[in-house]
Image (cartoon, rainbow, N blue to C red):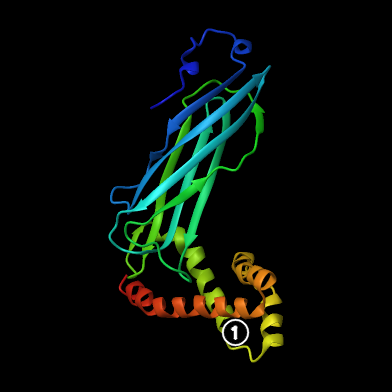
Amino acid sequence: MRFQSAILVPLFLTLSAWSQLTYTVPVTDKSDPGSPLKISGTASFTERIVANSVTSSSNFKVEALNVSGKAIVLLLAYFDEAGPHGGRTHHPVEIDHFFWSAIAPGDSFVLARSRSRRRTYPLETAVEPKAEVGVQYVQFVDGSTFGDETKAKGILGLRRVILESLRRLDTATGKEEFLALLAQKIQPDDADGFLETFRQTKKNYGSVAARAQVHTGLIVAERRSPALRVQAAKK
């Protein structure tokens, strides 16, 4: 584990002598054996201690490589980070390519990336900083899976709602009907959030581009559905 030399200061020094320090650690993969992803990356924590509080910021980039030999349609994972004196954060990761191009074998991609922000916490006893990733569930394009399928029940249910919405949009008889359907909010909120992709396309590029994007997503999903249904029926 790599730490900047600054943290090798003896622990008996007073906190006021520390001022501001940065700690860097490698990302640890906590996934079960057989994970289809190879994980790499580092996380850095910068802390400023004042009296009994610590102001902390983190900078991390977690990269993943598909080493499974099969294309990935759905990926659920988490990234947990914690600085030496507090500020534990759990980041759920959800990547669903059911309606888009799958993550091909050998593809590398960013699994998690930090957003610049500072937070202040009550000062805690110093512990080893943590940066851990766990791959919880993966669905491959052929319908086979890795991990705990119960983690994916919610998103698998959302797919049916989104698919029905895309079918309605794709069969709209004209521009006005298409735009009216696109503007309608659907439930649950996570499904409606998916439609924001098409609403943003309409806003930036027009209704023709949005309708083409809807059609592409629907075609990809319809092509994949039979294989995924067959595999699910075997379980």
The image position of residue 50, as x and y in percent, is 68, 19
As drawn, is 66 to the left or to the right of 168?
left
Identify the residue at horizontal 30%, vertical 73% (top origin): 234
The image position of residue 214, as x and y in percent, is 56, 77
Dot 1 crowding, Cα within 10 Å, few <14, some 14–19, many 20+: some
Of all residues shown, which one is farthest toward the front? 205
Please say if 112 is above or below 15: below
Is residue 23 visible in this depiction of the protein?
A: yes
The amino acid beneath tag 1 is: Arg
Query: In the rendered image, which quarter is residue 66 located in?
Result: bottom left
Q: Which of 14 and 117 is in front in this view?
A: 117
Identify the residue at horizontal 47%, vertical 69% (top origin): 100
Numbered disc 1: secondary structure: helix
As drawn, is 193 to the left or to the right of 83?
right
Identify the residue at horizontal 30%, vertical 54% (top origin): 67
Of all residues shown, which one is farthest toward the bottom? 173
Quadrant that contains the N terminus: top left
Q: Which of 22 and 207 is in front in this view?
A: 207
Query: In the rendered image, which quarter is residue 231 located in?
Result: bottom left
Q: Which of 120 and 40 is in front in this view?
A: 40
The image position of residue 103, as x and y in percent, is 39, 62
Identify the residue at horizontal 50%, vertical 52% (top origin): 93
Residue at label 1?
A: 168
Quadrant that contains the C terminus: bottom left
Is residue 187 visible in this depiction of the protein?
A: no
